[in-house]
Each structure stands twice: as C-alpha cells, then as structure tokens.
Amino acid sequence: MNVIPISYYLVLSAVLFGLGVIAFVFKRNVITIFMSIELMLNAVNLAFIAFARAHNQLDGLVFVFFVIVVAAAEAAVGLALVIMLAQNRQPLSVERMNHLKL
Amino acid sequence: MSVPFVLFFVCGALAVAGAILVIVAREPVHSALALVLVMVALAVLYLLLGAPFIAAVQIIVYAGAIMVLFVFVIMLLNAGAEERTDFSRVAKYIGLPLGFILMLWAAHWLWRSPVGGAIGTASATPAASSHDLSVELFRQYLFPFEATSILILIAILGALVLAKREE
C-alpha cells in the first residue's frame, strides 16, 4: 500500500487555513465570520493530526480534543452574543455593528 | 494510484471546494452546509491518518453538535442573504491578496521544509487506538482535561446570562 507523504496533508491544511482567513476578512455576516473561525480551527486540527502521525506520538491527538472543546465553548458563547444582538434589533452585518454598547 | 491516494485527493478537493463555497455563498445556511462538507471530508482524512476516534469525534461534535447549533441560530434569527456593500475597499485590495499570499507562502514553506519530507513516510505504524489515547489523556493530560470542564461550565453560564431575555 502506498503511503501518502505528510507534506500533502500539511499543504492541504495551509490552503484551508488561508481560505479561512480570506473568509474571515470577506464575510459580512457575524455568523459566517464565526464559521470561518471554525474553518481555521479545522485546518489547524488537520496539521496537528498529520504531525502526530509523522512523529508517531499521541500528544497531537490530545491537543485536537482540546481544540474541539474550546471551539464548542466559543461557538456557544458567540452564538449567544449573536442572539442577544438580534434581540436588540441590531443588524447582523458587522459593518453596521459599529457600537458594542447595547 | 492506490486507494489511499485517490481517497486523499478526492477528500482534499472536496474540503477545498467546500471552503471556497463557504466564501462565495451568500446565504448563511449555504455557508453552514458547505462547512459541514469540509468537516466530513476532513473526518475521512483523519481516518486515513490513522485516527479513527478523532474522526468519530469530528463527525459527532463538529459536524453534529456545533454545526447544528449554527444552523439552529441561523434559522432562529431568520438570517437572509448578506448584503453586499463596497464599504470596505481595504478588504478587497489588501485583504484578498494578503490572504492568498499567506496561503501560498505557508503551503510553499511546508512543501519545501524538511518538516514534511524527512518524516514523510512514517505512517506504516498501526492506527492510534482509543485505549492508548485515553491513557495519554487521563494520565499526562489530566489537569488540562479537568480545566476544560471548568471552561465548558463558564461557557454554559456565559451563554445563559447572555441569551436571557431581560424582563
């Protein structure tokens, strides 16, 4: 069975991270900006697992757990913030969200 | 071309296509569904990398729980198509080239560096079993694991306080 070089995974991870950065800069909706953060976290997870595989150690996999936990907590708090904004009749576009005092 | 190579290229292309779709989709729901596609493709890659437990967690927690939360909030708030303005030309003329430069530079660096090449063919080892993973998690990383429970508790309290409607 052929073996895929680790650098393939790393390049894919870098491309996904770059696309996440572009999405973060370009999207206007708060919810999609959160989603681009999740995309970047996923790209980093792929790099973690690829390195864990390459070095044949499990620490990278444990770090992926922690990244997933932090992403879940961040999504919960962030989406609660979005709901609070919507309750105050704020638009969801970040361009019109120019004051954080609610 | 063996089966893992084909799987890698198909899933990698799916992940990149999903990420591009996240950017170009105007409806937030479409972006969320494209992100689910990215996550499922990444789960297959995790399987290829010999991490089946992480792949299952990725499907259940990421594509299941977190993305359902996103879709739920999108539908709750009835978020329509995002408005296109040319208010920030900075994003168009500086952000996009810088994003592409970051992407290509990181890919180039990873491709050329000895990080990927020298250890590239180490995956003849067996897959990481969940037994080994749990031993690692509950012995060496016990304190960070317990600390994440505090983090989750704080996140629950924060979400409750923020989302509570004021009387």
Image (cartoon, grey):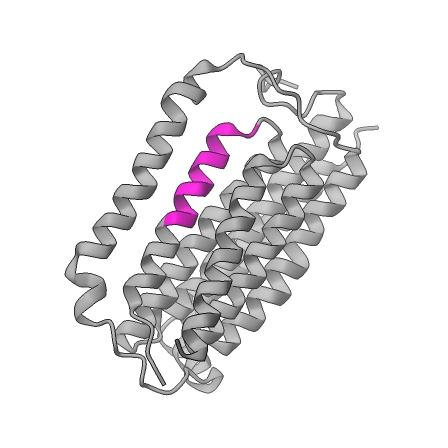
- Span highlighted in magenta in the image: A15-27
If the image is split into quadrants, where does the N terminus of chain B sit?
bottom left
Which corner quadrant of the image does residue A27 belong to? top right
Number of marks = 0
| Residue B96 located left or right of residue B75 | left
Residue A71 visible here: yes
- State the residue at coordinates (75%, 22%): A88
Across and down, in percent, residue B118 comes to: 16, 70
> Considering depth in this image, is A95 or B155 the residue closer to the camera?
A95
Q: Residue furthest top?
A: B87
- State the residue at coordinates (46%, 80%): B134
Across and down, in percent, residue A21 comes to: 43, 38
If the image is split into quadrants, where does the C terminus of chain B sit?
top right
User: Looking at the picture, does residue A95 appear above or below residue A30?
Assistant: above
Across and down, in percent, residue A22 comes to: 45, 35
Q: Residue furthest front?
A: B1
